[in-house]
Amino acid sequence: MTRELMNDGEHAGWTRWRREPDGRFTSMLGDFYFRADAGGAVECRMATDRRHTNGLGYLHGGFIMSFIDMAMFAFIFRQLENNAAVTLSCATDFLSAGIVGKHIEASGEILKETGKMLFVRGLVTQEGEKIASFTSTMRKVPRLPRPTGDGAASRPVTKAG
């Protein structure tokens, strides 16, 4: 996934995460934007369109949860200078239907960081309407070489503790 600071247009000052279409899940979602202020607060944004809808024509809960997962990594990007991370749990409460064609946004914070764990919470909104709230536990892991081809040949090995 590439990271690019936008210099003009609607997202000037935002960083864009983009994965070129390569058959991976995140490349199907679209561009993801985030920005951090001097105090460390991070906000995220993503455009929505028909591919993000459920059978009723609203934003699909799976899309919203995928957006949340990406937002959580934006919230912790400073903590991952020498590590990667994985999501261990994410509890999501859906509060209102998301409308197609309007940006969704997320804001959040790190509640606690230990040697290997990060505890995060946040809120997804759309035009000021609260769409979902979430809490998550994430684990820092060593940054390994990325799998090639169709994916990893075997499951990664992690040590307890």
Image (tube, grey):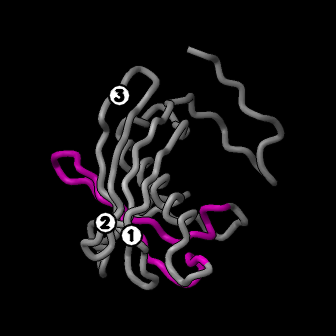
Instruction: Kindly indicate the quadrant of the structure image that contains residue 9.
Output: bottom left
Mark toward the start of the polypeptide (1 vs 3): 1
Front in this rendered view, residue 46 or 21: 46
Image quadrant where one finds the C terminus: top right
Residue annotated with mark 2: 130
| Residue type for callout 2 | Lys
Q: Tell whether position 88 is magenta.
A: no
Image-based side of 2 in relation to 109, left or right: right
Q: Which residue is mark 3?
A: 113
Q: Quarter of the image containing the N terminus? A: bottom right
Disc with the residue nearer the chain's start (3 vs 2): 3
Question: Which residue is found at the position 41% from the left and 20% from the top?
Answer: 115
Task: Classify mark 2: helix, strand or loop.
Answer: strand
Indicate left or right for 153 with 47 as reference: right
Q: Position of residue 54 (x, y in %)?
A: 59, 76
**Where residue 27 appears, x then y in whole percent?**
62, 66
Q: Amino acid under label 1?
A: Ser
Segment colored magenta:
25-54
Residue that label 1 marks: 96
Task: Count residues near mark 2 (Cα–Cα under 10 Å), then give few for <14, some for 14-19, many for 20+.
Answer: some
Residue located at (52% from left, 36% from top)? 84
Q: Amino acid at mark 3?
A: Glu
Q: Quadrant of residue 51?
A: bottom right
Kind of element beneath mark 1:
loop
